[in-house]
Amino acid sequence: ETGVTQSPTHLIKTRGQQVTLRCSSQSGHNTVSWYQQALGQGPQFIFQYYREEENGRGNFPPRFSGLQFPNYSSELNVNALELDDSALYLCASRRGHLQETQYFGPGTRLLVL
Amino acid sequence: QQQVKQSPQSLIVQKGGISIINCAYENTAFDYFPWYQQFPGKGPALLIAIRPDVSEKKEGRFTISFNKSAKQFSLHIMDSQPGDSATYFCAASMGGAQKLVFGQGTRLTINP
């Protein structure tokens, strides 16, 4: 186990709703990245937070937003949910934003109906 | 140019055999190439990683071979065991600070 925890483990929402997913980074890690993993696909980078600021973003629309708190935990918010948002959402942490090794949490499985 | 292409999609190997998974990339700015192992219901776990200044790295039964000129790298699992059955992802990043770009994954099954 990596020490990265995520909640909830599973979530069911309907189209148009909003969802908040949470991540606690490994102790001593100040950088958190979020990835979306569709079924049968590799993870895709959503964005990264370092010292409470977003410092990198993938090809995801603005309805995907995030926060990082002073204790380095993080939230991913998705507004106006679409069916295609159904996926495993992974959080990864690392010791610094220049460190290469990322440690992933177990993910939150989101189903949008 | 940001893609990492992985093959095969699925692989079946007999216990004790060698499992080989291949990846190719286009962006020569990539300078960090990790492999992750993912079991059902779990997040990806880092197995082994390599930088382009070396051609091979070995950790236990796992070896990465890296061909910079061909822009290809591969994972070899020696003496494959049923417990190695999982999905494997190659990935790449540049500059250390950036996102990981993942391949599509290979579902590996080791038959007893």
Image (cartoon, coloured by chain):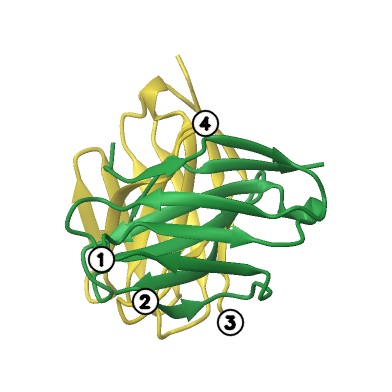
Mark 4–mark 1 distance (CA, rounded to whole Å): 28 Å
Q: CA distance from mark 2 to mark 1?
A: 32 Å
The amino acid type found where label 3 is placed reads Gln
Instruction: State the image coordinates of residue B29 (x, y, percent, origin top left).
Output: 40, 85
Instruction: Give whichever of discs 2 and 4 has the lower sequence position.
Output: 4
Q: CA distance from mark 3 to mark 4?
A: 30 Å
Element type at mark 1: loop
Residue at 44% from the left image edge and 45% from the top image edge:
B20
Q: Which chain is yellow?
A: B
Residue identifier under label 1: A30
Circle 3 or circle 2, nearest the eye: 3
Which residue is painted at 43% across and 71% down in the image? A48
Residue picked out by circle 3: B1
| Nearest to viewer (mark 2 / mark 4) | 4
**Mark 3 or 4, nearer chain start:** 3
Query: CA gap, disc 2 to disc 4?
Result: 32 Å
Distance CA(mark 1)–CA(mark 3): 29 Å
According to the image, label 4 marks what residue? B40
Left or right relative to B91: residue A61: right
**Chain under label 2?**
B
Q: Indicate the amino acid at tag 1.
A: Asn
Front residue of this view, candidates B32 and A7: A7
At 45% from the left and 36% from the top, the residue drawn is: B42
Q: Is residue B110 above or below residue A66?
A: above
Q: Secondary structure at mark 3?
A: loop
Residue at horizontal 19%, vertical 46%? B59
Whole-percent x, y for residue B89 in the image: 48, 51
